Image (cartoon, grey):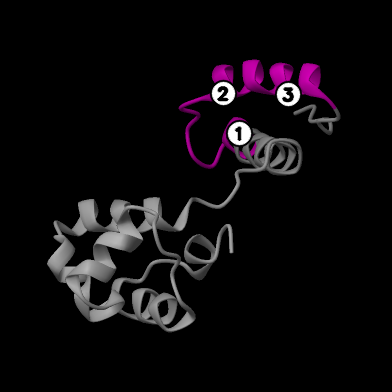
């Protein structure tokens, strides 16, 4: 096992090539250990150099609606009236702090997603 830090995109590509060769390594082997370490190094490098911005709050709500098969009416306890739900989902109104708290508590949408772009 010869693992080196990933300093740049060339190192990243080499790590990916090695990762492909190790893919499917039998658990408990040195190859499986190398695969695990390479995965962590790649994740660290990508998080540092290619961070993912938090999702848009409205997109996070719509994603949760799709996941749970919810309708606009199902959002009324968290957001307010039918008109208010429509305004939020169409981007005409921003979420208030009480709405964010209710959406987080009731639908388990991460605060990071609901507070993005605030």
Question: What secondary structure predominates along the stretch shown in magenta?
Answer: helix
Between the C-alphas of marks 2 and 1, the distance is 6 Å
| Region in magenta | 8-33
Report the disc number at residue 22. 2
Mark earlier in primary sequence (2, 3): 3
Disc 3 crowd rating (10 Å Cα; few below 14, some 14-19, many 20+) is: some
Secondary structure beneath dot 1 equals helix
Q: Does the magenta stretch include residue 117?
A: no
Q: Which of 52 and 21 is in front in this view?
A: 52
Report the disc number at residue 35. 1
The C terminus lies in quadrant: bottom right
Position of residue 15 in the picture relative to residue 24 (left or right): right
The structure residue drawn at horizontal position 61% and vertical position 40%, both measured from the top left corner, is: 36
Report the disc number at residue 12. 3
Q: In which quarter of the image is residue 91?
A: bottom left
Asked if marks 2 and 1 touch (Cβ < 8 Å), the reply is yes
């Amino acid at each position: 096992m010869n693992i080196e830090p990933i300093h740049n995109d060339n190192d990243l590509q080499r790590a990916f090539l090695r990762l492909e060769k190790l893919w499917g390594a039998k658990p408990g082997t040195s190859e499986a250990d190398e695969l695990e370490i390479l995965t962590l190094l790649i994740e660290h490098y990508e998080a540092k150099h290619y961070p993912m911005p938090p999702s848009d709050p409205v997109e996070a709500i719509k994603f949760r609606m799709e996941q749970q098969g919810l309708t606009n009416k199902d959002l009324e306890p968290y957001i307010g009236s039918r008109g208010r739900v429509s305004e939020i989902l169409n981007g005409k109104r921003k979420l208030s702090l009480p709405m964010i708290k209710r959406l987080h508590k009731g639908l388990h949408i991460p605060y990071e997603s609901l507070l993005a772009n605030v």
